[in-house]
Image (cartoon, rainbow, N blue to C red):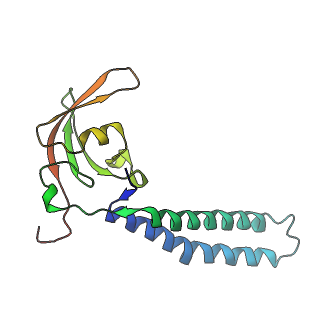
Amino acid sequence: MGSYITAEGFKKLQEEEHRLWKVERPRVTREVSEAAALGDRSENAEYIYGKKRLREIDRRLRFLAKRMDELTVVAPSREQEGRVFFGAFVRVEDPEGNETEYQLVGPDESDLPEGRLSIESPLGRALLGKSEGDEVRVPRPRDGGVGVFEVLGIRYLWDDPSA
């Protein structure tokens, strides 16, 4: 599978890049300059820490720039309605009757506690292409069993506000 991301996930990466470039980096650069002006840099903890933090920020900025070039933003299409595809919100029920809703997303924005399930996870892969009422069987590595889930509902967020 390619490297996919939702428009919302891509926007968050852009916001992080902007914050690092326009807020964090200038602030840390200013702090390093002020610490350097104090004299002996070899024993100046603020200077040493600031230089380390600048390297971390620059490394993250390089990563974000490269990663955003590799990602494909995928918006849901009306033709997908009724079936599970990337970006879908899927409500499932486990054998104990517990209902959970997940949004199928790329690995860059996966966050299970927030309900964002990677399409590369076993459950994410199993859900792709399914319809409401379908049963999904997923191997459970911990105990060697199989988790069985029923698809209860599928919805998408459309870009069109009149949707």
Q: Is residue 28 left or right of residue 103?
A: right
The residue that appears at 26% across and 63% down in the rendered structure is 75
x, y percent for residue 107? 41, 50
Height in image: 32 above or below 83? below
- Which quadrant of the figure has residue 24? bottom right
Quadrant containing the C terminus in the rendered view: bottom left
Quarter of image, res 33: bottom right
**Front-most of residues 84 and 30:** 84
Residue 55 x %, y %? 68, 65
- Number of marks in picture: 0
Q: Is residue 152 above or below residue 5?
A: above
Side of 142 relative to 62 (left or right): left
Residue at 12% in and 42% down: 132
Rendered view: 90 above or below 27: above
Work out whether residue 42 or residue 91 is closer to the camera in this orientation and state it: 91
In percent of the image, x 68 and y 78: which residue is there?
Answer: 30
Residue 96 in percent (x, y) is at 21, 26
Q: Position of residue 109 (x, y in %)?
A: 39, 54
Relative vertical location of residue 28 with respect to residue 118 in this rendering, above or below: below
Left or right of 154, for residue 35:
right
Q: Quadrant of residue 149?
A: top left
- Name the foreground residue: 99 vs 72: 72
